[in-house]
Image (spheres, grey):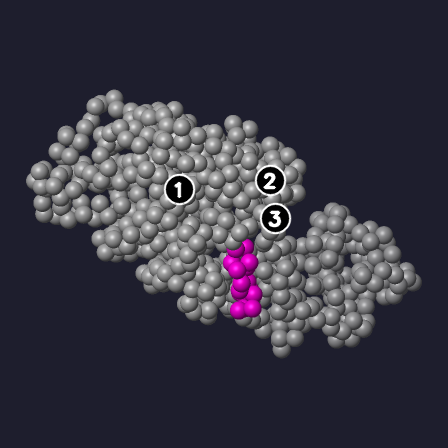
Amino acid sequence: MKKISIYNLVILLAMLAVIPACFNDLNTVPIDDDVVTSANVYDDPAAYKQVLAKLYAGLAVSGQQGPSGQPDLSGLDEGFGQYLRGLWYLSELPTDEAVIGWNDKTIKDFHYQSWDANDGFIYAFYSRIFYQISLCNEFLRETTDAKLDDRGVTGDLRNEIATYRAEARFLRALSYWHALDNFRNVPFVTEDDKVGSFFPRQISKDELFSYIESELLAIEGQLTAPKQNEYGRADQAAAWTLLAKLYLNAQVYTGAAHYDHCITYCEKVINAGYSLDPEYKNLFLADNNNSQEVIFAIAFDGQRTQTWGGTTFLVHAPVGGSMLPADFGIDGGWGGVRTTSAIVAKFPAVGTGSVLVAPNPGNTTYPVLYVPGGYQGWDPSKTSTVLASANVDGKFEGYLYFPDSNTEFKFTDGPSWDVNYGDTGADGVLDPGGDNIKVADPGFYKIDVDLNNLTYTVLKTTWGLIGSATPDGWNSDQNMTYDPTSNTWSVQLDLTPGEVKFRANDDWGLNYGDNGADALLERDGANIAIPQAGNYKITLYLDKPDHTYSIELTSFDRRALFVTEGQTLDIDDISQFSNGYAVAKWRNVTSTGQPGSHPTFPDTDFPMFRLADVYLMYAEAVLRGGGGSTSAALDYVNQVRARAYNGPSGNIDQNTLDLDFILDERSRELLWECHRRTDLVRFGKFANTDYLWQWKGGVKDGAAVSDNYNIFPIPAADLGANPNLVQNAGY
């Protein structure tokens, strides 16, 4: 059952009375209307799990009453001050992945990479990090062996609490990692520090790295085995993934590489029983809790975790312009977030790919019968509007398109009016010099003429693809679309290995296959083979005497969830939502198309750790010299790409797999999932001129900024209150 463990919670505000004096300047004062204390909270055996739930909920909500009211931290906006939203702002807005069209305070400074120590958004996330750490510390203080002995806690509950403590240490390590990644040298407090008036020391980035590492290694054996814990709670695989991330970035944090360790822990996760979700888009829907790919998620529920941050922000903020909120399961869009042209350029153009079957021009020298009419200017000399006699037997056949209703035409045996045929009486019998023949409706028509007995038939047709390779098998057609410019029928869709045929009007009375696999179509011919799964564009050419077709395996990346209607690729004005492509990634809709439980607050969870990320981390660590298997790295990357392309059309070879490719692939796969700033910093492309995008550095075409922007400043308010803190260089 979804999320029960996290959201059936009792608000236990005693935990909040733990913030050390160094945070008094931040106005992060516990809100405690009921004067609940640890002395009475833990009298209830169920309280331990309920407090644990509060620790997890600290990542999802911002107070005791959603979406606002009774906040955890006073003086902070509950939308901006929510944990995930703060993480997203710092991870995405300073990069090529995201711009936001609002004028909220200093938010545009993120795009320009021009923030300072007084920035309110940086302050909000910094405060949220250390509030979360404070909660974890207090829970650990209240669950020591001595405290449990005093309360007489024994048996199964005692064993469960040991697991809870390991999870609390994981959550604390996660927040300290966010502190390390974003701020480097930060105040340091654990459960061993007494609650009271003191100034926490500032720990160095090297020390903090070692602390996070030691904590995760210490709890590895205490956490639940992978995939065995309740949904939304951490297990061993979550700790392994965090260790892999820590080691992947170790050279940035400490100057020492740990790529071999990264590979070790990636392998642990890979071998733990997770699997890629068959449908990429399902990872970001309202029932993504069912995915076998997600290792650790921040869980959200429209009824029980109402917040203006989290996935409420991620679903609403990108919706605007021509986008319909109902398609996203919400009651309105916020018209804010888009992406830049630099990200769009990393995806292949839709429809590019490899041709597996090319059109066969066939024989073009058959005897012909001309068909002049109102649709082509009554010109009997136009060879583009003729019927052909493939058997040279006086029987002519072909397809013509009539764009207008009540179109009239006749037949001529040459490019002149000397010998012409019409139909006086409209009885299907041709009369020399007879009346014009008329089609009542516009459309694409099959016309057959037998000059041996002066008869003809006119059949309006629409065409479809059917077969075992199609989504509906042999049960129903996949409709094709007619293009009057090219005079072709085509369809682009996902196919599986199997067979197909073309048929008209959803009926077997008129169908084509291919005898001999020569790309020439025969009526009632053999099934056409589809060799492999993938996205295909299949085109039907019926305008020539020998009918033919083509099969193109496209390079269509399903992760390119861009909305282009009403949007410009270039961003001339960040404030205008129409500038920059929108991204239709996050939705409050289930995989079966049902809306979430609430039209404002999504049921969609945030997959903080998932298998595809681990695959890509493994490949990167191998390329950086961490050992491992180059063939396995290639295989993992191609598994990710095969899911994106619904088949092997997007697969790469060993020569293509390099670090630049990995960086781009991480953006394609993990767009808007809070990885991009960390990735760009690790690759040395965040601040300098090695990589530019629109509005980096406050210039439309992009400009370099100082390297100090690779990390954020310690907020000025905390710096001024704690004499032990030293500001990060450059601020």
> Measuring 52% from the left and 27% from the top, which residue is drawn there?
105
Q: CA distance from mark 1 to mark 2?
A: 25 Å
Q: Which mark is residue 697?
A: 2
Q: CA distance from mark 3 to mark 1?
A: 26 Å
Expressed as whole percent of the image width and height from the top left, the position of residue 491 reads 61, 57
Q: Which residue is mark 3?
A: 689
Q: Secondary structure at mark 3?
A: loop
Q: Badge 2: how crowded within 10 Å, few (<14), some, or many (20+)? A: many
Q: Which residue is mark 1?
A: 185
In the foreground, 180 or 262: 180
In the foreground, 225 or 324: 225
Q: Quadrant of residue 271?
A: bottom left
> Measuring 52% from the left and 30% from the top, which residue is drawn there?
106
What's the residue type where badge 3 is placed? Thr
- Whether residue 583 appears in this view of the structure is no
> Measuring 55% from the left and 28% from the top, which residue is drawn there?
103
Q: Earlier in the sequence, mark 3 or mark 1?
A: 1
Q: Is residue 366 left or right of residue 100?
A: right
Q: Badge 1: how crowded within 10 Å, few (<14), some, or many (20+)? A: many
Q: Secondary structure at mark 2?
A: helix
Q: Is residue 675 left or right of residue 379?
A: left
Q: Is residue 592 left or right of residue 212?
A: right
Q: Secondary structure at mark 1?
A: loop
Q: Earlier in the sequence, mark 3 or mark 2?
A: 3
Q: Which residues are magenta?
A: 649-664
Expressed as whole percent of the image width and height from the top left, the position of residue 480 reads 61, 56
